[in-house]
Image (tube, rainbow, N blue to C red):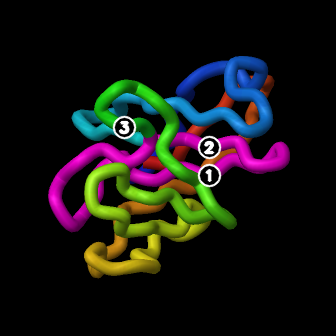
Amino acid sequence: MQEWVTLCSVSELGPGQREVFGVEGRWIAVFNVGGRYYAIEDLCTHDGNVLAFDLQDRPSKLVDYEIECPRHGGRFDIRSGKATRSPAEIDVPWFQVRAEGGNLQILV
């Protein structure tokens, strides 16, 4: 059964920001793009690397709703989890996000 899980308050994730949250044994990357929220699993399906930040904790490249893996350049659409550029070929899990009572929540 799916349930909504609260991640943080809306005010903690401003426009242009991203954050990674541990939820039920998974790392979930949440993005605020122009006041809309998107969430995907923070895991490159090509090599198991993280997506939202590089190894020095700098934000990874985000271009037109696509996050680029900092290691090999594979890309994923944060609106759907779809793999959009090789070497990534397998989509990443995507999560529905909502703002409820001043908090950001994802459906897991």
Which residue is the site of mark 2? 31
* Image-based side of 21 in relation to 24, left or right: right
Give percent across and percent down for residue 63.
63, 61
| Amino acid type for the residue under numbered disc 3 | Asp
Give yes or no for residue 73 being in the magenta stretch: no
- Distance from disc 3 to disc 1, alpha carbons, whole Å, reads 19 Å
* Image-based side of 52 in relation to 11, left or right: left
Q: Are marks 3 and 1 in contact (CB under 8 Å)?
A: no
Which residue is the site of mark 1? 38
Characterize the local packing of mark 3: few (<14), some (14-19) or many (20 or more) Cα atoms within 10 angstroms: some
Q: Do the residues labelled 3 and 2 touch (CB within 8 Å)?
A: no
Camera-near label (3 vs 2) is 3
Give percent across and percent down for residue 15.
79, 36
Characterize the local packing of mark 1: few (<14), some (14-19) or many (20 or more) Cα atoms within 10 angstroms: many
Judging depth in this view, the residue of 13 and 46 nearest the camera is 46
Q: Which of marks 3 and 2 is nearer the N terminus?
A: 2
Q: Which of marks 3 and 1 is nearer the N terminus?
A: 1
Q: Give the residue drawn at x 73%, y 39%.
A: 16
Up-down: is 6 above or below 97? above
Give percent across and percent down for residue 105.
60, 36
Q: Give the range drawn in magenta.
A: 29-52
Q: Which of marks 2 and 1 is nearer the N terminus?
A: 2
Which numbered circle lies on residue 54? 3
Which numbered circle lies on residue 1? none
Give percent across and percent down for residue 31.
62, 43
Q: Are marks 2 and 1 in contact (CB under 8 Å)?
A: yes
